[in-house]
Image (cartoon, grey):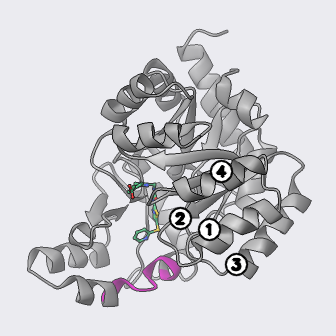
Amino acid sequence: MKTRITELLGIEYPILQGGMAWIAESTLASAVSNGGGAGIIAGGSAPIDYLREQIRKAKTLTDKPFGVNIMLMSPNADDLAQLVVDEKVAFVTTGAGNPAKYINSWKENGIKVIPVVSTVNLARRMERSGADAIIAEGTESGGHIGDNTTMCLVPQVVDAVSVPVIAAGGIADGRGVAASFMLGAEGVQVGTRFLASDEVQINPVYKELVIKAKDTDHIVTGFYTGHPCRNIKTKFSKKLQTFERDGGTPEEFEKITIGSLRKAVQDGNIEEGTFLCGAIAGMINDVKPCADIVKDMFSQAEKLLKLN
Ligand code: TUI
């Protein structure tokens, strides 16, 4: 399945792994890259020394291209923007903001730039700023989300820009890949499916929550902080939702949720952790190696699209 995305990144299958904060580290990223996709190390709000170490570790685990996701709300975003240049990372994806001020420097250094957007307006601005491709991320995604669905957003972004578009949000098997291609995308970004992989480094409690999740087991919290986040429905996330509805202040919300991503990923702390996940979690029922996830997804998609 050759597209402008496989060309741009020098990969076999047009799939990017999501830049999941606290989760997407060198073991996962290299496993996805070795499986023919594009693995990604997430910057999140991690310290720069840790990220340098992860990038260098990934280079020992794969000789295939991998990227780094820069979460633009992080206080370390400027330093990470420079680190990817120093480490000659193949490509960068960005989220939770506008990366325009970094794009020239990345491009001068041969780094491919792929911003994540949740609106057509930002997609247009990113193309004008020199983005090589755009990830159009629907509200089905896990973590920080926009309002528009993948089904509605992707074709509108495809119509608005001429660089290749990657669909994200709610894609976890070959049907999602095929549907994305029918909408005009030339690649997919997948996050939640890789939470149920052999190589992901998360607490087993987190993996179990994803596998056990039903279609309705996800929830969006943090609306009024301006950063709504989709996560797995737990007693804790339901409590947060009630707290918001009952008029708890954003400051109090911040206090309760601080450190809650780490508590989920590292400790599997069901009482105080925020387990980010996409709306497709209900469809994911098994754990397999990243390479099989990628291969199975594309053999199913190719059959559906009658490419072979
Ligand atoms: O960034 C994501 N997903 C994320 S980031 C994250 S870490 C976090 N934790 C707590 C609160 C907030 C973040 C967890 N998941 N996805 C990409 C994405 N980017 N979705 C939406 C956007 C976005 C939003 C606003 C992109 C740009 C933007 O503003 C552009 C502007 O003009 O400033």
Residue extent of the magenta highlight: 256-263
Within 10 angstroms of label 2, few (less than 14), some, or many (20 or more) residues?
many
Are circles 1 and 3 on residues that touch, CB within 8 Å? Answer: no
Q: Position of residue 242 (x, y in %)?
A: 15, 76
Name the amino acid, label 4: Asn
Disc 4 C-beta below 8 A from ligand 1: no
Q: Mark 1 points at which residue?
A: 43
Mark 4 secondary-structure assignment = helix
Q: Mark 3 points at which residue?
A: 48
Q: Earlier in the sequence, mark 3 or mark 4?
A: 3
Name the amino acid, label 2: Met
Residue under the image location 32 percent in, 66 percent down: 227
Name the amino acid, label 1: Gly
Disc 2 C-beta below 8 A from ligand 1: yes
Q: Above or below — where is 90 with respect to 242?
A: above
Question: Which numbered circle lies on residue 104?
Answer: 4
Give the image quarter of residue 112.
top right
Question: Which numbered circle lies on residue 177?
Answer: none
